[in-house]
Amino acid sequence: MRTRQLRLAAAFLASAVATVLLLTACGSSSSSTTPTASAYAALTSSPACTQLRTQHPDLAGKKLTNAINPHTPGYESISVADPTKYEGFDIDLGEAIGACLGFTVGYLPVSFEALLPTLQSGQANFVISDIYATTQRAASADFITYSKVFDGVLVAKGNPKHLTGIDDSLCGTTTALNKGFVEVPLVEAQSTKCTAEGKPAAQTALYDNNADCVQAILAGRADSYINDVNTVNRFVKDQPDKLERATAVTLPYSIGIAVPKGNTELRGAFTGALGEIQSSGLQTTLSRKWQLDESAVQAPSLVTAS
């Protein structure tokens, strides 16, 4: 049986390079901009990926679903060129992992707070969607880290409220945040500190996606928005006359890939593929392509609740 599985995996590999740029997605969505075919071909044919496919033959020829919240430009968003497709660093990274392990990728768009419940329900096989790997979230899924976290504080042009971070400057202001973001309890903790000091509370306004958070600032419904610094910088670049970054904040987290809790087979396969993607320099290439901080690349490590 194992010999037959390996023959099937080898047969799939013969067509993998030709098909990897045509990866289909749930709802007919897929990445519209990917690295060159030669980059994927080199990854697919590398000794490390060849060995990984031998070790994990059941993934060959499969289509795995990635749950994403496609509203973070640079990481995952709807393609400007083709609204039926997705694009971004996380899209390319997921497809690179698929190229290494021999599977194709489909996508299931959901709200940010629904990412892990979607994974838990079995509707998705993994999550690569700019999600921070925290011990609290590790109660719902196992995480494989791949990037360090640096947050930015987005404000209206001129920083009219003189915000300086997640500190007392937030007292009496409103921060727009995605539901489920790790920044929500951080701002709430700051609010408690504000009231304890006799200052106005730090309010939060929760939304389903980043675009709505930014729109809240533009419409005057919020004073700030806190997220990954690359995301914040991109919004400033898109509207430099209306937005600016007040400051950068270092958070004690990493960005990670979420896989079903306890699925050591998939977790091991993804960790191995990610290691090869990093050692080959492909992750750095993808970071450069999507204008992300190349220095944020982090060697794979596990974040679990146990």
Image (cartoon, grey):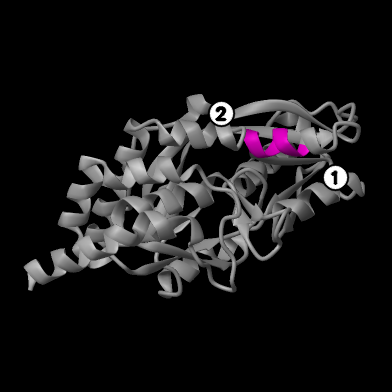
Residue 124 in sight in this render? yes
Kind of residue at badge 2: Asp
> Would you call the spot at circle 1 few (<14 residues within 10 Å), some (14-19), or many (20 or more)?
many
Residue 264 included in the magenta stretch of the image: no
Viewer-side residue, 204 vs 115: 115
Q: Which residues are magenta?
A: 228-235
Which secondary structure class fits the magenta region best? Answer: helix
Q: Which residue is mark 1?
A: 217
Q: Is residue 27 above or below residue 178?
A: below
Name the secondary structure under disc 2.
Answer: loop
Q: How many marks?
A: 2
Which percent across, then down, holds residue 293?
Answer: 56, 28
Name the secondary structure under disc 1.
Answer: helix
Residue 82, by quadrant, is bottom right
Residue displayed at 76% across by 27% down: 246
Viewer-side residue, 61 vs 97: 61
Residue 231 included in the magenta stretch of the image: yes
Q: Give the label on residue 73, or none.
A: none
